[in-house]
Image (cartoon, rainbow, N blue to C red):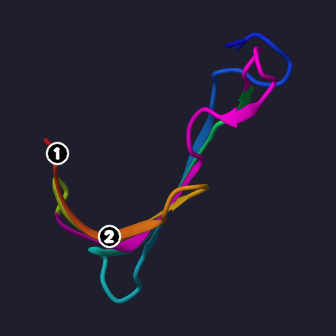
């Protein structure tokens, strides 16, 4: 496998964006959202010349609510959707407790 050519290398591009909106009816409740992206380039088999993806590209969308009980204790309830390029998409609900000190 040739990973030092102009047609592809074993690297990836990734990034995320998070947004939070403090609701006007409660100083403890936020609407939250997140977008994650993970993309992989194609690589080439130097014996056959065939190009293929070395991993599946992924976009993850998340949206939900975050409630702050106190400065160091938060509850977050979200829905996450995983959008794969070639695999079957999936989604699920998640709950997270955050304790910081």
Looking at this view, is 2 or 9 the one in front?
2
Q: Residue furthest front?
A: 48
Q: Is residue 46 magenta?
A: yes
Looking at this view, is 31 or 93 the one in front?
93
Q: Is residue 4 left or right of residue 81?
A: right
The quarter of the picture where the N terminus appears is top right
Which span of residues is magenta-colored?
44-69
Q: Is residue 40 left or right of residue 21?
A: right
Q: Where residue 18 appears, x then y in whole percent?
A: 50, 57
Looking at this view, is 86 or 11 the one in front?
86
Q: Residue at x 77, y 30 (%)?
A: 50
Q: What is the CA distance from the residue labelled 2 to the residue labelled 1?
A: 25 Å
Mark 1 neighbour density, 10 Å: few (under 14) some (14–19) many (20 or more):
few
Mark 2 neighbour density, 10 Å: few (under 14) some (14–19) many (20 or more):
few
- Residue under numbered circle 1: 100
Q: Is residue 68 left or right of residue 60?
A: left
Looking at this view, is 74 or 45 the one in front?
45
- Residue under numbered circle 2: 92
Q: Is residue 27 positioned above or below 9 on the image?
A: below
What secondary structure is marked by label 2? strand
């Amino acid at each position: 496998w040739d990973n030092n050519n102009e047609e592809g290398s074993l690297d990836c591009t990734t990034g995320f964006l998070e947004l939070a909106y403090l609701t006007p009816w409660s100083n403890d409740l936020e609407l939250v959202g997140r977008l994650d992206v993970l993309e992989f380039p194609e690589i080439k088999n130097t014996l056959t010349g065939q190009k293929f993806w070395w991993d599946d590209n992924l976009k993850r969308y998340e949206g939900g609510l975050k409630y702050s009980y106190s400065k160091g204790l938060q509850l977050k309830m979200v829905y996450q959707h995983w959008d794969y390029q070639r695999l079957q998409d999936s989604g699920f609900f998640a709950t997270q407790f955050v304790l910081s000190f």
